[in-house]
Image (cartoon, helix red, strand yellow):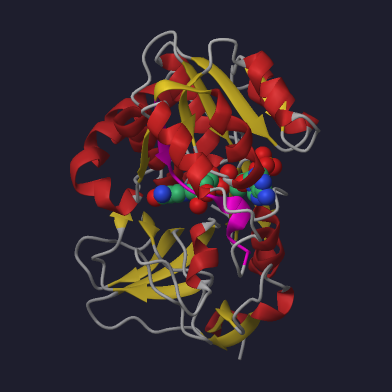
Amino acid sequence: MSHSETNLRIVLAARPRGTPTAADFRLEQIPKPVAPESGVLLRTLYLSLDPYMRGMMNERAPAYTRSIPLSEVMPGGTVNRVVASGNPRFKAGNLVLGNAGWQEFSVSDGKDLLPLGTLDPPSRALGVLGMPSFTAYVGLLDIGQPKPGETVVVAAATGAVGAVVGQIAKLKGGRVVGIAGGPDKCRYAVEQLGFDECLDHRQPDLGKRLAAACPNGIDVYFENVGGAVFEAVLPRLNVGARIPLCGFVSSYNDENLPPGPNRVPLVQRVLLEKRVRLQGFIILDHYATRLESFRREMGDWVTKGQVKLREDIVEGLENAPSAFIGLLEGKNFGKLVVRLAAD
Ligand SMILES: NC(=O)c1ccc[n+]([C@@H]2O[C@H](COP(=O)([O-])OP(=O)(O)OC[C@H]3O[C@@H](n4cnc5c(N)ncnc54)[C@H](OP(=O)(O)O)[C@@H]3O)[C@@H](O)[C@H]2O)c1
Protein backbone atom coordinates (compact mmCIF):
# COMPACT_ATOMS: atom_id res chain seq x y z
CA MET A 1 0.00 0.00 0.00
CA SER A 2 1.39 3.43 -0.80
CA HIS A 3 1.19 6.03 2.00
CA SER A 4 -1.62 7.92 0.25
CA GLU A 5 -3.83 4.81 0.42
CA THR A 6 -3.34 4.05 4.08
CA ASN A 7 -4.92 5.23 7.29
CA LEU A 8 -2.92 5.39 10.49
CA ARG A 9 -5.06 4.91 13.60
CA ILE A 10 -4.78 4.09 17.29
CA VAL A 11 -7.15 1.58 18.84
CA LEU A 12 -7.78 0.47 22.42
CA ALA A 13 -5.62 -2.67 22.79
CA ALA A 14 -6.29 -3.46 26.45
CA ARG A 15 -8.21 -2.04 29.39
CA PRO A 16 -5.83 -0.15 31.68
CA ARG A 17 -5.28 -1.31 35.24
CA GLY A 18 -4.73 1.99 37.02
CA THR A 19 -2.50 4.34 35.05
CA PRO A 20 -2.66 3.55 31.30
CA THR A 21 0.54 2.30 29.66
CA ALA A 22 1.71 2.27 26.03
CA ALA A 23 0.59 -1.39 25.80
CA ASP A 24 -3.05 -0.34 26.26
CA PHE A 25 -2.94 1.34 22.82
CA ARG A 26 -2.15 -0.13 19.38
CA LEU A 27 -1.00 1.83 16.33
CA GLU A 28 -2.42 0.28 13.16
CA GLN A 29 -2.06 0.93 9.46
CA ILE A 30 -5.18 0.01 7.52
CA PRO A 31 -6.53 0.95 4.05
CA LYS A 32 -7.84 4.51 3.80
CA PRO A 33 -11.66 4.50 4.12
CA VAL A 34 -13.82 5.22 1.10
CA ALA A 35 -16.70 7.63 1.64
CA PRO A 36 -20.14 6.48 0.48
CA GLU A 37 -21.60 8.47 -2.43
CA SER A 38 -23.36 11.04 -0.22
CA GLY A 39 -20.71 11.02 2.52
CA VAL A 40 -17.66 13.06 3.43
CA LEU A 41 -14.04 11.86 3.49
CA LEU A 42 -12.06 13.71 6.15
CA ARG A 43 -8.40 14.17 6.97
CA THR A 44 -7.62 14.90 10.62
CA LEU A 45 -5.51 17.98 11.24
CA TYR A 46 -5.85 18.21 15.05
CA LEU A 47 -7.00 15.73 17.69
CA SER A 48 -8.12 16.88 21.14
CA LEU A 49 -6.94 14.82 24.12
CA ASP A 50 -9.25 15.12 27.12
CA PRO A 51 -9.49 13.50 30.57
CA TYR A 52 -12.97 12.02 29.86
CA MET A 53 -11.34 9.49 27.52
CA ARG A 54 -9.88 7.66 30.53
CA GLY A 55 -13.33 6.67 31.83
CA MET A 56 -14.30 5.37 28.39
CA MET A 57 -11.36 2.93 28.45
CA ASN A 58 -12.90 1.09 31.42
CA GLU A 59 -15.31 -1.78 30.98
CA ARG A 60 -17.73 0.10 33.21
CA ALA A 61 -17.67 3.62 31.80
CA PRO A 62 -19.32 6.58 33.59
CA ALA A 63 -23.09 6.72 33.04
CA TYR A 64 -22.94 9.77 30.74
CA THR A 65 -20.71 8.05 28.21
CA ARG A 66 -19.95 4.60 26.73
CA SER A 67 -17.22 2.03 27.11
CA ILE A 68 -14.92 1.79 24.07
CA PRO A 69 -14.93 -1.80 22.76
CA LEU A 70 -11.47 -3.39 22.52
CA SER A 71 -9.82 -2.88 19.10
CA GLU A 72 -12.04 0.14 18.38
CA VAL A 73 -10.49 3.48 17.41
CA MET A 74 -9.95 5.76 20.41
CA PRO A 75 -12.62 8.48 20.23
CA GLY A 76 -12.02 12.21 20.30
CA GLY A 77 -12.97 15.62 18.99
CA THR A 78 -11.05 16.68 15.88
CA VAL A 79 -10.49 19.47 13.42
CA ASN A 80 -10.65 18.04 9.91
CA ARG A 81 -10.10 19.07 6.33
CA VAL A 82 -12.71 17.76 3.86
CA VAL A 83 -10.89 15.65 1.27
CA ALA A 84 -13.92 14.72 -0.85
CA SER A 85 -17.63 15.21 -0.38
CA GLY A 86 -20.87 13.94 -1.89
CA ASN A 87 -22.79 15.96 0.72
CA PRO A 88 -23.96 19.32 -0.63
CA ARG A 89 -23.22 21.03 2.75
CA PHE A 90 -19.49 20.43 2.40
CA LYS A 91 -16.87 20.95 -0.29
CA ALA A 92 -13.35 19.58 -0.62
CA GLY A 93 -11.00 21.92 1.24
CA ASN A 94 -13.55 22.97 3.92
CA LEU A 95 -12.41 23.05 7.53
CA VAL A 96 -14.80 21.30 9.95
CA LEU A 97 -15.12 20.32 13.60
CA GLY A 98 -15.72 16.57 13.83
CA ASN A 99 -15.43 13.47 15.98
CA ALA A 100 -12.98 11.40 13.95
CA GLY A 101 -11.03 10.10 16.96
CA TRP A 102 -7.41 8.98 16.94
CA GLN A 103 -6.92 8.44 13.19
CA GLU A 104 -5.69 10.18 10.04
CA PHE A 105 -8.72 9.62 7.79
CA SER A 106 -12.39 9.02 8.50
CA VAL A 107 -15.79 9.18 6.84
CA SER A 108 -18.92 10.94 8.03
CA ASP A 109 -22.48 11.40 6.83
CA GLY A 110 -22.02 15.08 7.69
CA LYS A 111 -24.51 15.19 10.59
CA ASP A 112 -21.78 15.48 13.25
CA LEU A 113 -19.73 18.05 11.35
CA LEU A 114 -19.67 21.78 12.04
CA PRO A 115 -18.17 24.16 9.46
CA LEU A 116 -15.30 26.23 10.87
CA GLY A 117 -14.87 28.70 8.02
CA THR A 118 -11.37 30.16 8.08
CA LEU A 119 -10.69 29.85 11.82
CA ASP A 120 -7.01 30.57 12.43
CA PRO A 121 -5.40 28.69 14.07
CA PRO A 122 -8.06 26.00 13.66
CA SER A 123 -6.96 24.15 16.82
CA ARG A 124 -8.79 26.86 18.81
CA ALA A 125 -12.03 25.05 17.96
CA LEU A 126 -10.90 22.31 20.38
CA GLY A 127 -9.87 24.67 23.17
CA VAL A 128 -10.66 28.31 23.82
CA LEU A 129 -13.58 28.28 21.37
CA GLY A 130 -14.54 24.66 22.01
CA MET A 131 -15.74 22.12 24.54
CA PRO A 132 -13.35 22.83 27.47
CA SER A 133 -13.97 26.56 27.32
CA PHE A 134 -17.74 25.98 27.04
CA THR A 135 -17.45 23.79 30.14
CA ALA A 136 -15.69 26.59 32.02
CA TYR A 137 -18.33 29.11 30.91
CA VAL A 138 -21.38 27.07 31.92
CA GLY A 139 -19.86 25.70 35.13
CA LEU A 140 -18.64 29.03 36.43
CA LEU A 141 -21.48 31.31 35.35
CA ASP A 142 -24.51 29.04 35.77
CA ILE A 143 -23.43 27.05 38.84
CA GLY A 144 -20.63 29.09 40.43
CA GLN A 145 -22.45 32.41 39.91
CA PRO A 146 -19.53 34.57 41.09
CA LYS A 147 -20.33 38.09 42.33
CA PRO A 148 -17.92 41.02 42.15
CA GLY A 149 -15.46 40.96 45.04
CA GLU A 150 -15.96 37.27 45.80
CA THR A 151 -13.03 34.84 46.01
CA VAL A 152 -12.96 32.17 43.31
CA VAL A 153 -10.55 29.25 43.62
CA VAL A 154 -9.89 27.06 40.59
CA ALA A 155 -7.92 23.83 40.41
CA ALA A 156 -5.85 22.66 37.38
CA ALA A 157 -5.58 26.40 36.86
CA THR A 158 -3.54 26.47 33.66
CA GLY A 159 -5.40 23.57 32.02
CA ALA A 160 -7.97 23.89 29.28
CA VAL A 161 -10.95 24.36 31.60
CA GLY A 162 -9.23 25.97 34.59
CA ALA A 163 -7.44 28.73 32.68
CA VAL A 164 -10.71 29.89 31.16
CA VAL A 165 -12.59 29.67 34.48
CA GLY A 166 -10.07 31.97 36.13
CA GLN A 167 -10.11 34.53 33.34
CA ILE A 168 -13.92 34.69 33.26
CA ALA A 169 -13.95 35.06 37.04
CA LYS A 170 -11.56 38.02 36.72
CA LEU A 171 -13.83 39.58 34.08
CA LYS A 172 -16.70 39.25 36.56
CA GLY A 173 -14.75 41.15 39.23
CA GLY A 174 -13.61 38.25 41.40
CA ARG A 175 -10.45 37.67 43.37
CA VAL A 176 -9.01 34.59 41.64
CA VAL A 177 -6.70 32.08 43.25
CA GLY A 178 -5.48 29.24 41.07
CA ILE A 179 -4.01 25.93 42.17
CA ALA A 180 -1.59 24.27 39.74
CA GLY A 181 1.29 21.81 39.58
CA GLY A 182 4.74 23.43 39.61
CA PRO A 183 6.29 26.90 39.67
CA ASP A 184 6.14 27.49 35.89
CA LYS A 185 2.41 26.90 35.73
CA CYS A 186 1.82 29.09 38.80
CA ARG A 187 3.90 31.95 37.40
CA TYR A 188 2.06 31.70 34.10
CA ALA A 189 -1.34 31.87 35.83
CA VAL A 190 -0.44 35.14 37.54
CA GLU A 191 1.69 36.84 34.88
CA GLN A 192 -0.12 35.76 31.74
CA LEU A 193 -3.67 34.88 32.80
CA GLY A 194 -4.02 37.68 35.35
CA PHE A 195 -4.89 35.56 38.39
CA ASP A 196 -4.33 37.26 41.74
CA GLU A 197 -2.38 34.30 43.11
CA CYS A 198 -1.60 30.73 42.17
CA LEU A 199 -0.49 28.01 44.57
CA ASP A 200 1.62 24.97 43.75
CA HIS A 201 -0.17 21.86 45.02
CA ARG A 202 3.08 19.90 44.83
CA GLN A 203 4.58 21.99 47.65
CA PRO A 204 3.75 21.27 51.34
CA ASP A 205 1.12 23.04 53.44
CA LEU A 206 -1.36 23.79 50.68
CA GLY A 207 -4.09 24.39 53.27
CA LYS A 208 -2.11 27.05 55.13
CA ARG A 209 -1.05 28.79 51.92
CA LEU A 210 -4.65 28.71 50.69
CA ALA A 211 -5.84 30.34 53.93
CA ALA A 212 -3.25 33.12 53.47
CA ALA A 213 -4.23 33.63 49.82
CA CYS A 214 -7.96 33.74 50.66
CA PRO A 215 -8.22 36.01 53.71
CA ASN A 216 -11.97 36.39 53.15
CA GLY A 217 -12.54 32.64 52.65
CA ILE A 218 -13.67 30.92 49.45
CA ASP A 219 -17.00 31.74 47.80
CA VAL A 220 -16.66 29.63 44.64
CA TYR A 221 -14.50 26.56 44.24
CA PHE A 222 -14.36 25.25 40.67
CA GLU A 223 -13.52 21.58 41.11
CA ASN A 224 -11.41 19.90 38.42
CA VAL A 225 -9.12 17.78 40.51
CA GLY A 226 -10.48 16.37 43.80
CA GLY A 227 -8.21 14.53 46.26
CA ALA A 228 -5.77 16.54 48.37
CA VAL A 229 -6.74 19.82 46.68
CA PHE A 230 -10.39 19.39 47.64
CA GLU A 231 -9.36 18.54 51.20
CA ALA A 232 -7.37 21.79 51.40
CA VAL A 233 -10.31 23.83 50.08
CA LEU A 234 -13.06 22.29 52.23
CA PRO A 235 -12.32 23.99 55.60
CA ARG A 236 -11.99 27.41 53.94
CA LEU A 237 -15.39 27.52 52.23
CA ASN A 238 -17.64 30.42 53.19
CA VAL A 239 -21.29 30.19 54.17
CA GLY A 240 -23.23 30.00 50.91
CA ALA A 241 -20.24 28.82 48.83
CA ARG A 242 -20.85 27.22 45.43
CA ILE A 243 -18.90 24.30 43.99
CA PRO A 244 -19.32 23.49 40.29
CA LEU A 245 -18.17 19.85 40.30
CA CYS A 246 -16.63 19.57 36.86
CA GLY A 247 -14.17 16.71 37.36
CA PHE A 248 -11.83 14.95 39.78
CA VAL A 249 -8.93 14.01 37.57
CA SER A 250 -6.62 13.05 40.46
CA SER A 251 -8.72 9.87 40.88
CA TYR A 252 -9.39 8.84 37.28
CA ASN A 253 -6.65 6.19 37.30
CA ASP A 254 -7.72 4.73 40.67
CA GLU A 255 -9.25 1.28 40.55
CA ASN A 256 -10.58 1.42 44.09
CA LEU A 257 -11.62 4.02 46.62
CA PRO A 258 -8.74 5.12 48.87
CA PRO A 259 -8.56 3.31 52.24
CA GLY A 260 -10.37 4.84 55.24
CA PRO A 261 -10.96 6.57 57.56
CA ASN A 262 -14.40 7.33 56.23
CA ARG A 263 -14.46 11.12 55.64
CA VAL A 264 -18.03 11.31 54.30
CA PRO A 265 -19.44 12.68 57.60
CA LEU A 266 -16.78 15.41 57.64
CA VAL A 267 -17.63 16.47 54.09
CA GLN A 268 -21.35 16.40 54.85
CA ARG A 269 -20.87 18.47 57.99
CA VAL A 270 -19.06 21.22 56.10
CA LEU A 271 -21.60 21.19 53.26
CA LEU A 272 -24.45 21.50 55.74
CA GLU A 273 -22.93 23.99 58.19
CA LYS A 274 -21.74 26.25 55.40
CA ARG A 275 -24.91 25.78 53.30
CA VAL A 276 -22.70 24.89 50.35
CA ARG A 277 -24.26 24.22 46.96
CA LEU A 278 -22.25 21.53 45.18
CA GLN A 279 -23.51 20.61 41.73
CA GLY A 280 -22.07 18.11 39.30
CA PHE A 281 -22.61 18.85 35.64
CA ILE A 282 -21.92 17.29 32.25
CA ILE A 283 -21.40 19.76 29.47
CA LEU A 284 -23.28 17.63 26.92
CA ASP A 285 -26.51 18.62 28.68
CA HIS A 286 -26.01 22.33 27.97
CA TYR A 287 -25.37 22.57 24.23
CA ALA A 288 -29.03 23.10 23.33
CA THR A 289 -29.52 26.03 25.69
CA ARG A 290 -26.16 27.70 26.27
CA LEU A 291 -23.97 27.23 23.17
CA GLU A 292 -25.22 30.33 21.40
CA SER A 293 -24.49 32.73 24.24
CA PHE A 294 -21.10 31.05 24.82
CA ARG A 295 -20.16 31.55 21.18
CA ARG A 296 -21.17 35.19 21.26
CA GLU A 297 -19.54 36.13 24.58
CA MET A 298 -16.43 33.99 24.34
CA GLY A 299 -15.88 35.02 20.72
CA ASP A 300 -15.94 38.62 21.88
CA TRP A 301 -13.60 38.03 24.85
CA VAL A 302 -11.13 36.11 22.69
CA THR A 303 -11.16 38.75 19.95
CA LYS A 304 -10.46 41.46 22.53
CA GLY A 305 -7.66 39.38 24.09
CA GLN A 306 -9.53 39.16 27.41
CA VAL A 307 -9.52 35.37 27.42
CA LYS A 308 -6.70 33.24 26.05
CA LEU A 309 -5.63 29.66 26.32
CA ARG A 310 -2.15 28.31 25.85
CA GLU A 311 -2.05 25.23 23.59
CA ASP A 312 0.24 22.29 24.26
CA ILE A 313 0.66 20.85 20.77
CA VAL A 314 2.16 17.39 20.34
CA GLU A 315 3.37 16.41 16.86
CA GLY A 316 2.28 13.12 15.32
CA LEU A 317 -0.46 10.58 16.05
CA GLU A 318 2.08 8.03 17.31
CA ASN A 319 2.78 10.35 20.26
CA ALA A 320 -0.88 10.57 21.35
CA PRO A 321 -0.74 7.70 23.92
CA SER A 322 2.21 9.13 25.88
CA ALA A 323 0.70 12.62 25.73
CA PHE A 324 -2.62 11.27 27.03
CA ILE A 325 -0.93 9.36 29.86
CA GLY A 326 0.89 12.62 30.74
CA LEU A 327 -2.38 14.58 30.79
CA LEU A 328 -3.58 12.46 33.71
CA GLU A 329 -0.36 13.25 35.60
CA GLY A 330 -0.13 16.99 34.93
CA LYS A 331 2.55 16.85 32.22
CA ASN A 332 0.51 19.02 29.81
CA PHE A 333 0.77 22.78 30.04
CA GLY A 334 -2.39 24.21 28.49
CA LYS A 335 -4.92 22.62 26.15
CA LEU A 336 -3.47 19.32 24.93
CA VAL A 337 -3.83 18.81 21.18
CA VAL A 338 -2.14 16.44 18.72
CA ARG A 339 -1.24 17.75 15.27
CA LEU A 340 -1.59 15.07 12.61
CA ALA A 341 -1.17 17.18 9.50
CA ALA A 342 -0.36 20.77 8.53
CA ASP A 343 -3.24 23.27 8.41
N1 LIG B 1 -18.08 17.91 33.46
C1 LIG B 1 -17.77 18.05 32.17
O1 LIG B 1 -18.62 18.05 31.29
C2 LIG B 1 -16.33 18.23 31.81
C3 LIG B 1 -15.94 18.67 30.52
C4 LIG B 1 -14.58 18.89 30.27
C5 LIG B 1 -13.63 18.65 31.27
N2 LIG B 1 -14.04 18.19 32.48
C6 LIG B 1 -13.09 17.97 33.57
O2 LIG B 1 -12.38 19.16 33.79
C7 LIG B 1 -11.11 18.85 34.36
C8 LIG B 1 -10.03 19.58 33.59
O3 LIG B 1 -10.02 19.08 32.26
P1 LIG B 1 -9.07 19.74 31.15
O4 LIG B 1 -9.47 19.17 29.85
O5 LIG B 1 -9.05 21.19 31.35
O6 LIG B 1 -7.65 19.11 31.53
P2 LIG B 1 -6.33 19.92 31.89
O7 LIG B 1 -6.61 20.74 33.10
O8 LIG B 1 -5.83 20.59 30.67
O9 LIG B 1 -5.34 18.75 32.26
C9 LIG B 1 -5.51 17.98 33.43
C10 LIG B 1 -4.76 18.65 34.59
O10 LIG B 1 -5.19 18.07 35.80
C11 LIG B 1 -4.19 18.26 36.77
N3 LIG B 1 -3.95 17.01 37.50
C12 LIG B 1 -3.78 15.79 36.99
N4 LIG B 1 -3.56 14.90 37.98
C13 LIG B 1 -3.61 15.60 39.13
C14 LIG B 1 -3.47 15.26 40.50
N5 LIG B 1 -3.22 13.99 40.88
N6 LIG B 1 -3.61 16.23 41.43
C15 LIG B 1 -3.85 17.50 41.05
N7 LIG B 1 -3.98 17.88 39.77
C16 LIG B 1 -3.86 16.95 38.83
C17 LIG B 1 -2.91 18.64 36.04
O11 LIG B 1 -2.69 20.02 36.23
P3 LIG B 1 -1.61 20.54 37.30
O12 LIG B 1 -0.26 20.13 36.79
O13 LIG B 1 -1.82 21.98 37.32
O14 LIG B 1 -1.94 19.85 38.59
C18 LIG B 1 -3.26 18.38 34.59
O15 LIG B 1 -2.54 19.23 33.73
C19 LIG B 1 -11.00 17.33 34.36
O16 LIG B 1 -11.38 16.87 35.63
C20 LIG B 1 -12.03 16.92 33.33
O17 LIG B 1 -12.49 15.61 33.54
C21 LIG B 1 -15.35 17.98 32.76
Across and down, in percent, residue 229 comes to 63, 38
**Observer-nearest of 215 and 56:** 215
Q: Is residue 247 magenta?
A: yes
Q: Residue at x 26, y 46 (%)?
A: 286
Q: Please tell me which residue is depicted at 50% across the width and 41% down the height of the picture.
A: 267
Image position of 279 with respect to 79: above or below: above
Name the foreground residue: 189 vs 305: 189
Give 28 or 7, whichever is nearer the viewer. Answer: 28
What percent of the width, then of the height, locates residue 217? Answer: 53, 16
Residue 163 in sight in this render: yes
User: Is residue 123 at all visible to an observer of this figure?
Assistant: no
Q: Which residue sits at x=71%, y=23%?
A: 208
Q: Is residue 186 left or right of 90 when viewed as pictured?
A: right
Give the answer, above or below, for where 30 lies relative to 133. Answer: below
Residue 161 placement (x, y as % from top left): 50, 39
What segment is highlighted magenta in the picture?
Answer: 241-254
Residue lying at 62% horizontally and 40% vertically, measured from the top left: 334
Expressed as whole percent of the image width and height from the top left, the position of residue 318 reads 68, 70
